[in-house]
Image (cartoon, grey):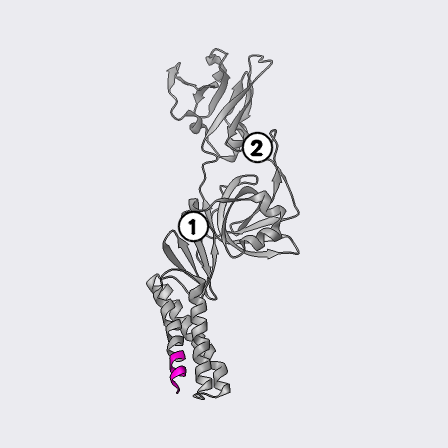
């Protein structure tokens, strides 16, 4: 072997070995490793150490060997991968996709995901929301933008398929929308595959936030598929304001409202969340809240063996565990209403 060929061989080995000692991601590590394999193969062919037939298989064998080392290094030593392509979500989060595994970077931590199985392992606050209407109004363009990357989407549920998946669609909402109702656009949809998520507490038109891996786009049905999903707990339904619609004609009688709840001189009560406006009867039936939620942190007085709760917008007369009456603040308490 000539001196020049020995130098090339050494250079090839250095190009292969050095990337394994650089613990940051850069595409140049992969380029260096592949270039080293090519140089070694060329040197051996020129020097006639192997025949042309074996020369065709040598790069493949070196690829398999170096890939196996990279796989083991990432899996067991928590080091930066080489045989991957990066999808950079932002400065804190990146996804490195390889043939049989991927690595998710959360801040400076590398999390190994064998066979693409785990859900989003980072804090969901590290990534921003993708607007559901923009995502689904341009599904093909948005897929090419976010494909093989984790995205966070907040939207309204348009369909629930047991505990296996839920669907979202683009929608139109107005200021007059009541009980979460919106008009869905049926031309496209986002299908969110679920894993260990119980959907019993969710209803159509509920706002939910998911982080998942944008895995597929079905052009024939204009459908985006989100896998490896993680539900983000939001506080959209934690804070609310109450709005009372007073009766124009009271008639001194109570009216059935919902289950064991009645109203007196009140036509309706609305709950204004940050995102939607609901009838109180609807959220009680839907169990978004229970009556005790209205009464927490509220003092009561006890008279005639009845409890009276003074809320900001109305009073609640608790006649018994099975009968409570919402009373207009302008009206005096009449205990005969409990009879």
> Disc 2 on helix, strand or loop?
loop
- Residue 201 placement (x, y as % from top left): 49, 41
Quadrant of residue 246 within the rendered picture: top right
Could you classify mark 2 by the number of other residues whose Cα lies within 10 Å: few (under 14), some (14-19), or many (20 or more)? some
From the viewer's side, name the closer residue of 223 and 199.
223
Q: Is residue 291 left or right of residue 253?
A: left
Reading the chain from its start, which is encountered first: label 1 or label 2? 1
- Residue 88 placement (x, y as % from top left): 47, 54
Quadrant of residue 72 within the rendered picture: bottom left
Residue 16 sits above or below residue 274 on the image:
below
Could you classify mark 1 by the number of other residues whose Cα lies within 10 Å: few (under 14), some (14-19), or many (20 or more)? few
- Residue 76 placement (x, y as % from top left): 34, 64
Q: Is residue 6 magenta?
A: yes
Q: Name the quadrant of the N terminus.
A: bottom left
- Say which residue appears at 65% left-offset and 45% top-offset: 186
- Say which residue appears at 52% left-offset and 35% top-offset: 286
Rendered image: mark on residue 179: 2
Q: Which residue is mark 1?
A: 91
Magenta residues, start to end: 1-8
Rendered image: mark on residue 313: none
From the viewer's side, name the closer residue of 143 and 184.
143
In front: label 1 or label 2: 1
- Residue 216 placement (x, y as % from top left): 57, 57
Can you name the residue that lies furthest to the top here?
332
Q: Do tag 1 and tag 2 residues touch (Cβ < 8 Å)?
A: no
Q: Is residue 292 magenta?
A: no
């Amino acid at each position: 072997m000539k001196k020049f060929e020995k130098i090339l061989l050494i250079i090839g080995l250095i190009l292969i070995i050095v990337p394994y000692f650089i613990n940051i991601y850069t595409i140049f590590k992969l380029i260096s490793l592949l270039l080293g394999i090519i140089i070694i193969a060329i040197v051996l062919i020129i020097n006639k150490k192997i025949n042309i037939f074996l020369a065709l298989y040598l790069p493949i064998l070196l690829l398999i060997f170096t890939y196996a080392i990279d796989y083991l290094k990432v899996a067991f030593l928590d080091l930066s991968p080489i045989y991957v392509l990066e999808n950079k979500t932002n400065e804190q989060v990146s996804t490195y996709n390889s043939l049989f595994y991927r690595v998710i970077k959360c801040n400076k931590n590398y999390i190994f995901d064998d066979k693409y199985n785990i859900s989003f392992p980072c804090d969901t606050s590290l990534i921003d929301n993708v607007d559901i209407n923009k995502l689904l109004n341009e599904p093909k363009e948005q897929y090419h933008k976010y494909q093989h990357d984790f995205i966070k989407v907040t939207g309204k549920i348009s369909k629930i398929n047991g505990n296996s998946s839920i669907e979202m669609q683009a929608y139109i909402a107005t200021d007059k929308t009541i009980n979460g109702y919106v008009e869905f656009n049926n031309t496209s949809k986002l299908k969110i595959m679920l894993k260990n998520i119980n959907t019993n507490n969710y209803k159509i038109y509920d706002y939910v936030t998911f982080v998942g891996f944008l895995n597929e786009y079905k052009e024939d049905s204009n459908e985006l598929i989100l896998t490896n999903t993680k539900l983000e707990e939001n506080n959209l339904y934690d804070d609310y304001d109450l709005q009372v619609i007073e009766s124009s004609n009271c008639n001194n009688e109570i009216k059935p409202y919902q289950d064991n709840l009645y109203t007196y001189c009140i036509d309706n009560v609305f709950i204004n969340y940050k995102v939607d406006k609901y009838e109180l009867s609807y959220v009680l039936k839907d169990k978004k809240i229970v009556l005790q939620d209205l009464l927490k942190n509220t003092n009561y007085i006890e008279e005639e063996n009845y409890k009276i709760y003074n809320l900001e917008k109305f009073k609640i007369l608790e006649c018994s565990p099975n009968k409570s009456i919402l009373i207009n603040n302008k009206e005096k308490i009449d205990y005969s209403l409990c009879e």
